Amino acid sequence: MKYANKEEFEKANMFGTGAYNENFAQYFTGDSFLNLLVNPEEVKLFMFNVTFEPGCRNDWHIHHAKTGGGQILICTAGEGWYQKDGEEPISLQEGSVAYIPTGVKHWHGAKADSWFSHISIEIPGTDTSNEWLERVSDEDYKNLKG
């Protein structure tokens, strides 16, 4: 379900918007927010609810790992996009799940007319890192249909 109105979106965003994503803002077009869901000191897992304002998306990036690694997205509120390099974008709605293997160039974010949240689970691995790449161009983003 699309949510243009933030107040209506907040009612559906069951894991909470959290704080402005200041530490990673340079890798996003638009504003995003992070709500830590588990303490990585206790669980050894990075799991956040990531919220995107309408039109917000992260830059192309790759999750690297020597072993293991990758990312799982579980869409919890609103509507968004996920795209692997060289493939058509996938529309994400509440309940959608996307698995992103290690080494796959991709991006994800909100649709232009909806707030969007997903739980991001960073899969444990050895020697994990993120490589941030170019922005998703405004032209490519505006051409998305859905």
Image (cartoon, rainbow, N blue to C red):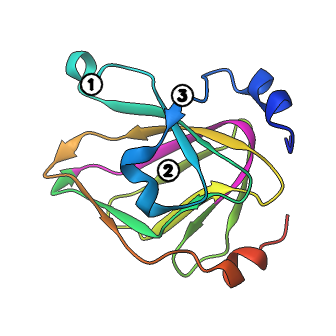
Q: Which residue is mark 1?
A: 40
Q: Quick one: SS at disc 1?
A: helix
Q: Residue at x 31, y 19 (%)?
A: 39
Could you tell me which quadrant the C terminus lies in? bottom right
Q: Main secondary structure of the magenta part?
A: strand
Q: Amino acid at mark 1?
A: Pro
Name the mark nearer the viewer: 3 or 1.
3
The magenta stretch is 68-81
Q: What residue occupies the far top of the structure in this picture? A: 42
Q: Quick one: SS at disc 3?
A: loop
Q: Residue at x 60, y 30 (%)?
A: 17
What distance separates the C-alpha of mark 3 from that of mark 2? 23 Å
Q: Looking at the rendering, which quadrant does residue 124 occupy?
A: top left
* 3 and 1 marks in contact (CB < 8 Å): no
Disc 3 or 2, which lies upstream in sequence? 3
Q: Which residue is mark 3?
A: 18
Residue 71 position, x and y percent, is 41, 48
What distance separates the C-alpha of mark 1 from that of mark 2? 21 Å
Disc 3 or 1, which lies upstream in sequence? 3
Could you tell me which quadrant the N terminus lies in? top right
Q: Which residue is mark 2?
A: 99
